Each structure stands twice: as C-alpha cells, then as structure tokens.
C-alpha cells in the first residue's frame, strides 16, 4: 500500500473515532402502557424536557456525548398541562425542568465516559411504571423491569401511584428486606445505592430505546 493509501486509511480511522465521540445518542421513548404517561428526560444543568404519550406513542430525545447522571422516567395522573402528577411529579410542568419526585422508576445513564456508555434501571427512588431499557447495539445488555410492583407493594411503602423504596421512606439505603423485595421483582434493576449487579455498559455512540410497560 502506498503512503497516500496508508494516510487515507488512517484519516478514515480518525474520522470514525471522531464520529463515535461526537455522535449525540438518540433515545426513543415509547409508551406501551394502557394509560397515558407523561414522559420526562433530564440531566443536571444540561437537559430538561417532557411530553405526553398516549398508548402507542413514541417520543425521541437526543443527548449529547459526555452527558452524565441523566434520567428518563414516566409520570402518571398528571393534568392536561403536565402538572400535579400522581407519581413522578417534577418542577416545570410538561417540560420538567428538574428531577422527579419519588416514587418513580428511572432509566439512568451517562454517555461517552471513556468511550463507553453506562446505563441502568433504578428503583432506588421506588417504582411507579414497568420499564425496559434497550440499547440498539445488539451486543449490549438489555434491561427489563416488567413486574407491576405496585400490586404487591408492602403497606409501609405504598404511596399514591407507586411503591416507595426503603431508602426514601425510612433512610435505610443499604441491603434490606425491602431492597430484596424490589430485587426479586426486578433482578435487572438497582434495588439500593451500591447494588453493583445492575449497571450495564455499551460502546459510546449507541442509541437506546426506553419502553414503559414492556
């Protein structure tokens, strides 16, 4: 191969690396529930938005590479303006300019952290809606919390529209019988802070799908 040919291949390699590191990740957020969900997407200081999703509707959100500690969740029982939600309520109405109130099932992620994305389903704030979190890259781990935990929530954790975690209800944020309850229902999800079985990773530049009621 000529020097020019080698240079062209090297340039293409650098271009591909540049694409991976600069590609905004698309999150396709789909409501498969038999009720309306007011979806929210938020990252500290970088991203806030929301949308009303009737059953079968999809909403797309772009997150920039380097986005950290972001979350997507669903609100239930909101009024027509996206306010006063029964679960997952947040400041800002429909557009949701801050983090939601527990209980809420969370899709959490940080993008392009050392050329990798990291993502999880978290029940540390409790549960309100079943959720699936699926990378478009077929080689990466798919996460699902399909159980309706609200139906069997212990009385002391029941809240309007959801099931509060022990961490939020009593301040017990370590392993406990309550965290075990969540883990048994949804083995793929975080049940308490420090649950190191729940985080998944994928190559930076991957797109994702978040499904309510998978």
Image (tube, rainbow, N blue to C red):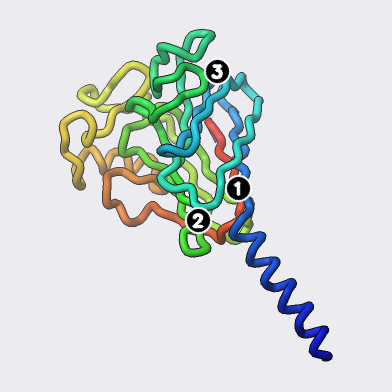
Earlier-in-chain disc, 1 versus 3: 1
Q: Nearer the viewer, mark 3 or mark 2?
A: 2
Decide: is 92 above or below 140: above
Residue at image position (53%, 59%) is 202
Image point (32%, 56%), residue name: 196
Tag 1 near tag 2, CB within 8 Å? yes
Q: Secondary structure at mark 1?
A: strand
Gap in angstroms between the C-alphas marked 3 and 2 = 31 Å
Residue 85 pos. (x, y %): 42, 15
Q: Quadrant of residue 125?
A: top left
Q: Is residue 214 toward the left or the right of residue 199 in the image?
A: right
Give residue 25's mark.
1
Q: Secondary structure at mark 2?
A: strand
* Residue that badge 2 annotates: 117
Query: Which residue in the protein does label 3 denote?
Result: 35
User: How many numbered circles does the render carry?
Assistant: 3
Mark 3: secondary structure = loop
Q: Residue furthest top?
A: 80
**N-terminal label among 3 and 2:** 3
Distance (Cα) linking label 1 and label 2: 10 Å
Depth check: give the residue in front, 106 or 142: 106
């Amino acid at each position: 191969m000529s020097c020019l040919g080698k240079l062209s291949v090297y340039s293409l390699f650098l271009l591909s690396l540049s694409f991976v590191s600069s590609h905004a990740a698309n999150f396709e957020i789909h409501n498969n529930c038999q009720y309306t969900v007011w979806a929210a997407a938020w990252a500290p200081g970088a991203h806030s938005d929301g949308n009303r999703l009737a059953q079968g509707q999809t909403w797309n959100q772009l997150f920039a590479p380097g986005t950290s500690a972001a979350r997507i969740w669903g609100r239930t029982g909101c009024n027509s303006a996206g306010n006063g939600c029964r679960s997952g309520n947040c400041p800002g109405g429909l557009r949701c300019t801050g983090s939601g109130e527990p209980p809420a099932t969370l899709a959490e992620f940080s993008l392009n952290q050392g050329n990798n994305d990291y993502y999880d389903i978290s029940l540390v704030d409790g549960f309100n809606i079943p959720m699936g979190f699926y990378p478009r890259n077929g080689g990466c781990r798919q996460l699902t919390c399909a159980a309706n935990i609200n139906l069997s929530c212990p009385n002391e954790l029941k809240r309007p529209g959801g099931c509060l975690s022990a961490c939020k209800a009593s301040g017990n944020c370590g392993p406990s019988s309550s965290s075990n309850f969540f883990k048994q229902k949804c083995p793929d999800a975080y049940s308490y802070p420090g649950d190191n079985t729940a985080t998944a990773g994928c190559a930076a530049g991957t797109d994702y799908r978040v499904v309510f009621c998978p």
